[in-house]
Image: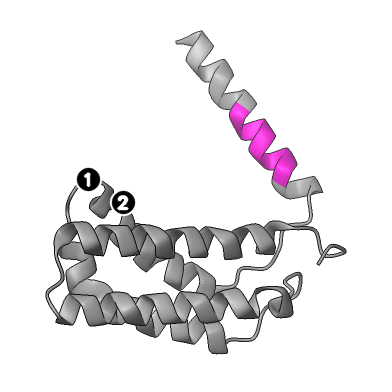
């Protein structure tokens, strides 16, 4: 029990130090909104559950479009991700078309996996320090 409490104190201290001394970027609401839909559809698809993407494909398009049209908060270089955001919107629209056309599970899973990779490409560009572009 004492070891558990000590571990919790250490973790809490590290979290506090990280938020206290590190400059945290502002949240990009539209990115967070898209991420919620991506996570809620991609991870179930990894387990063979395609119902979430079949029911949320239009929502994914809407969130991708909103993100593409949004203004980036301070600390983000939107110009660095504009082209990739366009790929994200195009990919989300393609998945929505596939869902409406009743595409097979494997085909849909493959396309969703590709879109997930595009999402991570954007995330990596967003994680770079401000002075790098």
Q: Which residue lies at the image location 20% right of the left edge and 64% below the top edge?
A: 52
Give the image quarter of residue 36. bottom left
Q: Position of residue 96 (x, y in %)?
A: 26, 79
| Total number of numbered discs in the rendering | 2
Q: Position of residue 22 (x, y in %)?
A: 78, 49
Q: Which residue lies at the image location 72% right of the left edge and 74% below the top edge?
A: 80
Element assignment for label 2? helix
Q: Which residue lies at the image location 37% right of the left edge and 64% below the top edge?
A: 38
Q: Residue 24: in sight, yes or no?
A: yes
In this view, the residue in front, 125 or 104, is 104
Give the image quarter of residue 109. bottom left
Residue 47's disc is 1
Quadrant where the C terminus sits is bottom right
In the rendered image, residue 13 lying in the magenta stretch gets the answer yes
Residue 36's disc is none
Q: Which residue lies at the image location 19% right of the left edge and 75% below the top edge?
A: 99
Q: Position of residue 42 (x, y in %)?
A: 32, 57
**Whether label 1 touches label 2, CB < 8 Å:** yes
Q: Mark 2 points at which residue?
A: 43
Residue stretch in magenta: 11-18
């Amino acid at each position: 029990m004492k070891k558990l409490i000590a571990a919790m104190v250490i973790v809490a201290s590290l979290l506090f130090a990280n938020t206290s001394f590190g400059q945290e970027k502002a949240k990009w609401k539209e990115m967070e909104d898209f991420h919620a839909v991506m996570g809620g559809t991609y991870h179930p698809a990894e387990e063979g559950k395609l119902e979430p993407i079949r029911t949320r494909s239009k929502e994914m398009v809407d969130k991708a479009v909103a993100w593409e049209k949004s203004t980036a908060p301070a600390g983000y270089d939107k110009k660095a991700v504009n082209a990739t955001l366009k790929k994200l919107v195009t990919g989300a629209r393609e998945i929505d078309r596939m869902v409406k056309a009743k595409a097979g599970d494997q085909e849909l899973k493959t396309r969703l996996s590709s879109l997930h990779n595009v999402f991570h490409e954007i995330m990596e560009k967003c994680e770079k320090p401000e002075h790098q572009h």
